[in-house]
Amino acid sequence: DKKTKHYSNMEVLIDNEKKLQWIEEKLNNVNWFDSQVFKIYYLEEHSLNSLQRATKINRNTLHRSIKIVKKYLKNEKHK
């Protein structure tokens, strides 16, 4: 019913907010450039190519930064 669906949607929103807060906290432990690249990539839903076009930063540099942050977050998640 509608009430159950609404409650379920709220749980998803709360869960997503907790995940975003966790990511924000963890990004404080990553160098500034990698952190900013990841935030823009993730929060603005860029592809690697669209991020390269938007920032004019070398695609390989962006890929390396995103990969570093993803690996770090994955390792932190499994601690």
Image: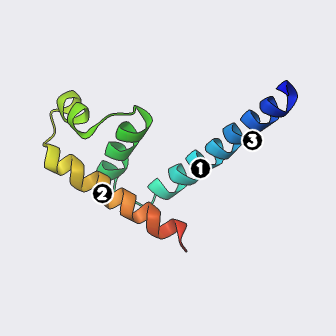
Of residues 12 and 66, the one drawn nearer to the viewer in this rendering = 12
Residue 32 as seen in the image, left or right of residue 28: left
Q: Residue beneath label 1, please?
A: 19
Q: Is residue 74 above or below residue 3?
A: below
Q: Nearer the viewer, residue 35 or 5?
A: 5
Q: Residue 54 in the image: x percent, y percent?
A: 22, 28
Quarter of the image for residue 58 reads top left
Which of the 4 image quadrants contains residue 55?
top left
**Under tag 3, what secondary structure?**
helix
Three-letter amino acid code at disc 2? Lys
Q: Are marks 3 and 1 in contact (CB under 8 Å)?
A: no
Which residue of the protein is positioned furthest toward the bottom in this rendering?
79
Nearest to the eye among marks 3 and 2: give it.
3
Residue displayed at 50% across by 68% down? 76
Say whether residue 57 is left or right of residue 41.
left
Q: Residue at x 53, y 66 (%)?
A: 77
| Category of crowding for the residue at label 3, using alpha-carbon neighbours closer than 10 angstroms: few (below 14), some (14–19), many (at least 20) | few
Coordinates of residue 11 in the picture (x, y in percent)? 74, 41
Q: Is residue 31 left or right of residue 8?
A: left
| 6 to 42, vertically: above or below | above
Amino acid type indicated by mark 1: Lys
Give percent across and percent down for residue 14.
Answer: 71, 41
**Above or below — where is 14 with respect to 34?**
above
Residue located beneath label 2 in the image: 67
Q: Earlier in the sequence, mark 3 or mark 1?
A: 3
Q: Which mark is residue 52?
A: none
* Quadrant location of the N terminus in the rendered image: top right
Q: What's the amino acid at mark 3? A: Glu
Of pointers 1 and 2, the one earlier in the residue sequence: 1
**Residue shown at 41% from the left, 40% from the top:** 42
Categorize mark 2 by other alpha carbons within 10 Å: few (<14), some (14-19), many (20+): some
The residue to which callout 3 is attached is 11
